[in-house]
């Protein structure tokens, strides 16, 4: 009976392994890279915005943050050379503060949002760069390569969320978070244009990049 029970358990293990292998084979065969690329990109954004929202400065911090909060909320002129786009966006965010005591928090949260979008575009940019390194001319990526590409992009983008300088600027009213966000969009658009430069409509993407 002992050897019979061992045989039964071995048979069940073999069946489970074969079923797992079949499921894994199906996932690899029907792998939709574009779908998972979008899902993981927004997942990185979600991780970033939760992290920064939980650690955002509730009021003014050191250096220029207090000035940017006051000039943004009242649409006044800051120190040269000025930051009109930042101050207009800050004025928009300050509208959502329930009372004057929460204006600083609202403007600080703008940096949280900009930084979360930055790491999302970084995820997609890393993916485009790695695809250039992995993919050979006239060859399609294998499912294993696609999983490796998504994993590397996810690790790189989420690691950047917790870097010291970036996290420091992501939770206070400073221009650096917004500047990094604009730079991330520009870099991503440039990679898209380089990928599709010979396709129809690529000129429109380049024009948008130049205007930005």
Image (cartoon, grey):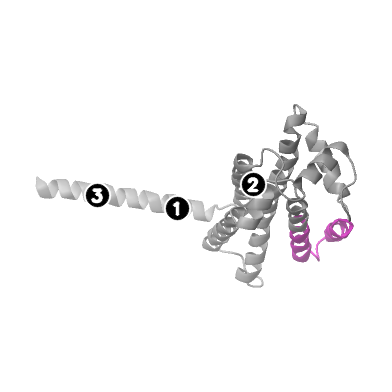
Type of secondary structure dominating the magenta stretch? helix
How far across and how far down the image is residue 85, in percent?
Answer: 86, 48
| Quadrant, the C terminus | bottom right
Which of marks 3 and 2 precedes in the sequence?
3
Magenta residues span: 185-212
Drawn side of residue 127 relative to residue 207, left or right? left
Drawn side of residue 152 relative to residue 115, left or right? left
Residue marked by disc 2: 45
Drawn side of residue 185 relative to residue 26, left or right? right
Residue marked by disc 1: 24
Q: Secondary structure at mark 3?
A: helix
Closer-to-camera residue (168/37): 168
Q: Do the numbered discs 3 and 1 sit on residues whose CB atoms are within 8 Å? A: no
How far across and how far down the image is residue 31, in percent?
Answer: 55, 53
How far across and how far down the image is residue 122, in percent?
Answer: 67, 57
| Distance Cα–Cα, label 1 vs label 2 | 28 Å
How far across and how far down the image is residue 11, in percent?
Answer: 24, 49
| Distance Cα–Cα, label 3 vs label 1 | 20 Å
Closer-to-camera residue (120/201): 120
Q: Secondary structure at mark 1?
A: helix
Which of marks 1 and 3 precedes in the sequence?
3
- 25 drawn magenta: no
Residue at 54% across / 52% down in the picture? 30
Residue at 59% across / 44% down in the picture? 51
Residue marked by disc 3: 11
């Amino acid at each position: 009976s002992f050897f019979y029970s061992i045989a039964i358990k071995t048979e069940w293990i073999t069946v489970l392994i074969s079923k797992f292998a079949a499921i894994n084979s199906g996932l690899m065969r029907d792998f939709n890279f574009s779908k998972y690329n979008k899902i993981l990109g927004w997942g990185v954004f979600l991780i970033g915005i939760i992290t920064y929202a939980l650690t955002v400065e509730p009021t003014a911090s050191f250096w220029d943050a207090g000035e940017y909060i006051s000039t943004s909320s009242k649409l006044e002129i800051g120190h040269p050379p000025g930051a009109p786009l930042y101050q207009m966006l800050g004025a928009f965010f300050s509208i959502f503060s329930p009372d004057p005591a929460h204006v600083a928090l609202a403007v600080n949260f703008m940096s949280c949002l900009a930084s979360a979008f930055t790491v999302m575009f970084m995820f997609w940019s890393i993916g485009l760069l790695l695809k250039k390194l992995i993919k050979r001319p006239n060859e399609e990526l294998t499912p294993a390569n696609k999983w490796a590409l998504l994993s590397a992009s996810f690790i790189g983008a989420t690691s950047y969320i917790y870097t010291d300088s970036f996290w420091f600027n992501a939770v206070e009213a400073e221009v650096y978070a917004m500047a990094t966000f604009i730079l991330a969009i520009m870099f991503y658009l440039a990679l898209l244009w380089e990928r599709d430069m010979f396709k129809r409509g690529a000129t429109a993407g380049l024009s948008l990049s130049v205007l930005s």
